[in-house]
Image (tube, rainbow, N blue to C red):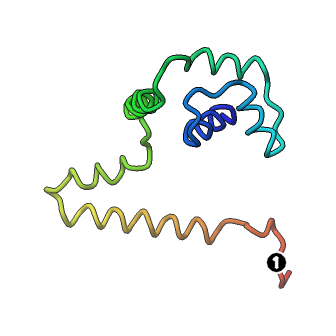
Amino acid sequence: MKIIAAYLLAVLGGNTCPSADDLKGILGSVGIDADDDRLELLLKEVKGKDITELVASGREKLASVPAGGGGAPVAVAAAGGGGGAAAPAAAETKKEEKVEEKEESDDDMGFSLFD
């Protein structure tokens, strides 16, 4: 990732075709030793390609990656619009249960100021 960042910095700085030495100079300026094999691999992969096209194709690929997980309960509650009063009541019950569990837990590992 550091090598890619150095490449992008070089391109943004005006060097449309940075060499391995250019990338080593950028990385060396912040105290990073670059691996020659990785430098050559990156330069071979991007040779003759426009950076804006590479970023655009990468953005398209990232758009297809699922990045969910936390939003599902909200979507389920919103989709059950027919039972408007039941859904908030169920949510309140869950919140109360979570609060009770937290109060009962031994965060102090069994030790107390008054024991």
Position of residue 16 in the picture relative to residue 21 (left or right): left
Position of residue 33 in the picture relative to residue 106 (left or right): right
Q: Residue at x 71, y 32 (%)?
A: 23
Quadrant (top left, top right, bottom left, bottom right) of the N terminus: top right
Q: Which residue is mark 1?
A: 112
Q: Badge 1: how crowded within 10 Å, few (<14), some, or many (20+)?
A: few
Q: x, y percentage for residue 81?
A: 16, 56
Position of residue 19 in the picture relative to residue 12 (left or right): right
Q: Residue at x 84, y 43 (%)?
A: 31
Q: x, y percentage for residue 65?
A: 42, 31
Position of residue 7 relative to residue 68, above or below, is: above
Residue 111 image-quadrant placement = bottom right
Position of residue 38 relative to residue 73, above or below, is: above
Q: Secondary structure at mark 1?
A: loop
Position of residue 91 relative to residue 74, above or below, is: below
Q: Report the front residue among 82 and 26.
A: 26
Q: Residue at x 30, y 67 (%)?
A: 89
Position of residue 34 in the picture relative to residue 13 (left or right): right
User: In the rendered structure, which amino acid carries the disc numbered 1?
Assistant: Ser
| Residue found at the far bottom of this picture | 114
